[in-house]
Amino acid sequence: MITHSRFFFALALFAIFYAGCSGTKTISTPKITDAPEIDGNISGWNMQDSVIDRTDVADYYASHDSDFLYLYIDVKSPAHNHAMKQSGFIIYISGSEEYRNRIGLAFPSGTFNLLRENPVVYDSFISDQEWFQQPQNMDRLEALESEIFDRVMVVEQIESDTNYGFIDKERLQVDGIEISTGNNRRLMTIEMRIPLNSSSIYNLNSNQLWLGFEIDPPNFRIQNNDNTTAGQQRYGRGRMAQGSNTSRMNLRQRMGQYERWYNINLSE
């Protein structure tokens, strides 16, 4: 298991594997009669018909029936797999292009994001240059790693404000949403079922859907009080130092910042 103490190694991997934003790809998904079991395994899928994209980061699959949209993500990049465990993996689905990223669910929620439940701790996390040198903070992150597949983060963006909340995964089933990950795999898989109606948090009422995937690392606000640079990031026994906005953006990229969008046509 990749632990937080190997953060610097993960940053080095991103120098090789980093993939950034992409344009929106228009796709059609097959209509199925036999719904897959949502257990994180690809066994119930017709892989050839349902694949919508193959990338260096992950292979993406989608299908639908009259009631639900089904998604399957097979992560291929070890670096981005690590980034998802830290910063979460947000899945956006909307019937509106203008508001396509208004509501998202992050699964896994990510250890960094789970710190948000304690605003004082999270503020220290993103602003204190010495935060990662404190053993109790490293212990906190290690403990939170066991919760990233049990807690789902809800992301709501209203104009320039972004709100974050957390719910237990089982509570999503009340709205008809199911989500799961495969067991005993080195790299994660994510399988999801979403109602094609207004009953869930996604509120889907259209045959044209915008589907997005995002890894959104924290925006650190650490001041650069010495001569260290943003490239000298160490996790565990070192310092974090940031200067300009450009340095912060570069750090987010090295931490696995990623975004990919698809326009799904369900009517064909």
Image (cartoon, rainbow, N blue to C red):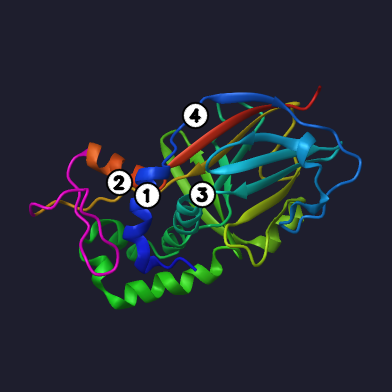
Q: Which residue is tagged 4?
A: 22
Residue marked by disc 3: 77
Alpha carbons under labels 3 and 1: distance apart: 13 Å
The C terminus appears in which quarter of the rendering?
Answer: top right
Q: Alpha carbon of mark 3 to alpha carbon of mark 2: how far?
A: 19 Å
Q: Is residue 138 above or below residue 211?
A: below
Mark toward the viewer: 3 or 1: 3
Q: Nearer the viewer, mark 3 or mark 4?
A: 3
Left or right of residue 44: residue 80: left
- The residue lying at 79 percent from left, 34 percent from top is 49
Which of the 4 image quarters holds residue 119? bottom left
Give me the C-alpha separation between circle 3 and circle 4: 17 Å
What residue appears at the point 64 percent right and 37 percent down from the top-left corner? Answer: 93
Task: Report whether 70 appears left or right of 217.
Answer: right
Horizontal and vertical percent for residue 17?
A: 43, 44
The percent coordinates of residue 251 (x first, y second) are 30, 46
Task: Find numbered disc 2 in the image and state the secondary structure of the residue it sits on.
Answer: helix
Q: Residue 251 carries which label?
A: 2
Viewer-side label of 3, 2: 3
Is tag 3's residue or tag 4's residue first in the polypeptide sequence? Answer: 4
Q: Earlier in the sequence, mark 4 or mark 2?
A: 4
**Label 4 neighbourhood size at 10 Å, few (<14), some (14-19), many (20+)?**
few
- Alpha carbon distance from label 1 to label 4: 17 Å
Q: Is residue 134 one of those drawn in magenta?
A: no
Asked whether the residues under the numbered discs 1 and 2 touch, taking CB atoms below 8 Å apart as contact, a structural biologist would say yes
